[in-house]
Amino acid sequence: MWMKRIRQDFNLALVVTFGVITNVMILPFAAYRFLSGQNLAALIDLLIVACISLGAVHAYVSGRTQGASLFLAVTYSIGCIAIAYVAGTAGSLWMYAVLLSNFLLIERLRAVLISTCAIAAVAASPLALPELAHKAAFVGSSVVVSLFSFAFAWRTDVQRQQLENLATLDPLTGAGNRRAMGAQINAALAESARSRKPLGLITFDLDHFKQVNDRFGHEAGDHVLVQVASVVRRITRRADRLFRLGGEEFALLIPDADAQALWEIAEKVRESLMREVRCGEFPITASFGGSLLRANESERQWRERADAAMYRAKREGRNRSIVDGVSRPANDNLLASAGAPSALSANERPIDLATRLGPDRLVC
Ligand SMILES: Nc1nc2c(ncn2[C@@H]2O[C@H](COP(=O)(O)OP(=O)(O)OP(=O)(O)O)[C@@H](O)[C@H]2O)c(=O)[nH]1
């Protein structure tokens, strides 16, 4: 369980790794210094180990890894300054490890700021660097290490972001994939339990999409999927998350909305798709199902209720929204009154309209 969490959370893995390394590397120094009578330096070592361990434990327990990372970077920097003033040159040598950890742990501009202060403070220590030549060499080598660390951290960030996008985004539409949905549902469930705010899920599936492909070609079908994702992203809130579950099926994770609001959101998306997404004159419609998370309900049951509502919307004629628990009048299909193209009646298949309209192959 703890291993799984660490494997899934890069920042937590980093903070915990630094916690372990600090214990393994600094505790022997503390023991050696006590034994050789350098009690103040040994106390500083122990203080560093205690603070870093606390930071790592706090990150693990609270999940707040960013604050913990900053705390670790500040502790390392202050610890290195203190040890340079107390233990002299031997203490200042830790600066190189501190610089690297700063750039790995925290955002780059903050790392530059904290590292610059630490380098200046250690360079000013008369005990660690008594001569000007020593100070110059220390500052020069520290700046070089900082630049390398900066470049390394930057490259690592870019590559991590690219890998994360590859692993979590649908390459066609840019919506989250199933994997991302699992992770974001877990985060949303935790947030909803903490804040006691409702959590809703809408699944929707394009109607008769096979016929779009059959008639206009796969490329046109792909373009429709891209348009659908783009419209949904534009008209939903920043906090709402769009996922493509596969094929022409999508899901929207909606925090902080009651069942009625969920139905209204589904209707808004349905109407917008019908109005804005077309393949030539061929209107694209979708069927929507929604469910609000119930107390003591499993995630699976919650998702199954949304799916069941969506399949019911398909069975009842498509191009409509059904939210589990929202009563019939609200759930009534508004197709006729909601600006559907007059050429398309509620039960008419889009392909019938397309056949009447004509074009054989076109990219939408
Ligand atoms: N262009 C394109 N088509 C896809 C993609 N993924 C799945 N499809 C097609 O989506 C179609 C889904 O067809 P069906 O499952 O029969 O569903 P439907 O025609 O939308 O019918 P209903 O859902 O019952 O309204 C199939 O023709 C798939 O080939 C994709 O990435 N791009």
Image (tube, grey):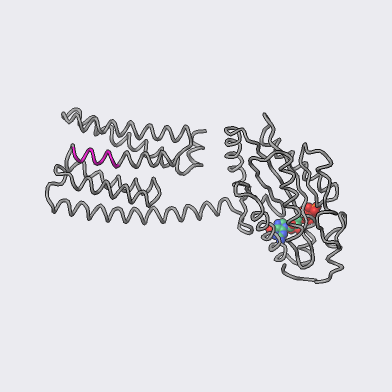
Left or right, 219 with respect to 112, comes to right
Q: Residue at x 81, y 54 (%)?
A: 338
Residue 333 forms part of the magenta stretch: no
State the quadrant of the C terminus.
bottom right
Q: How many marks?
A: 0
For the stretch drawn in magenta, the main secondary structure is helix
Q: Position of residue 296 (x, y in %)?
A: 67, 29
Left or right, 219 with respect to 54, comes to right
Position of residue 220 relative to residue 238, above or below, is below
Q: Position of residue 341 (x, y in %)?
A: 82, 61
Q: Residue at x 28, y 50 (%)?
A: 116
Query: Picture quarter containing residue 88?
Result: top left
Q: Position of residue 27 (x, y in %)?
A: 28, 32
Query: Picture quarter containing residue 355?
Result: bottom right
Position of residue 199 relative to residue 341, above or below, is above
Position of residue 287 relative to residue 66, above or below, is below
Query: Picture quarter containing residue 340?
Result: bottom right
For the magenta stretch, what is the residue range? 77-85
Q: Residue at x 71, y 61 (%)?
A: 224
Rendered-image quarter of ligand 1: bottom right
> Residue lying farthest left?
131
Q: Position of residue 328 (x, y in %)?
A: 83, 40
Left or right, 108 with respect to 328, comes to left
Q: Residue at x 45, y 56 (%)?
A: 158
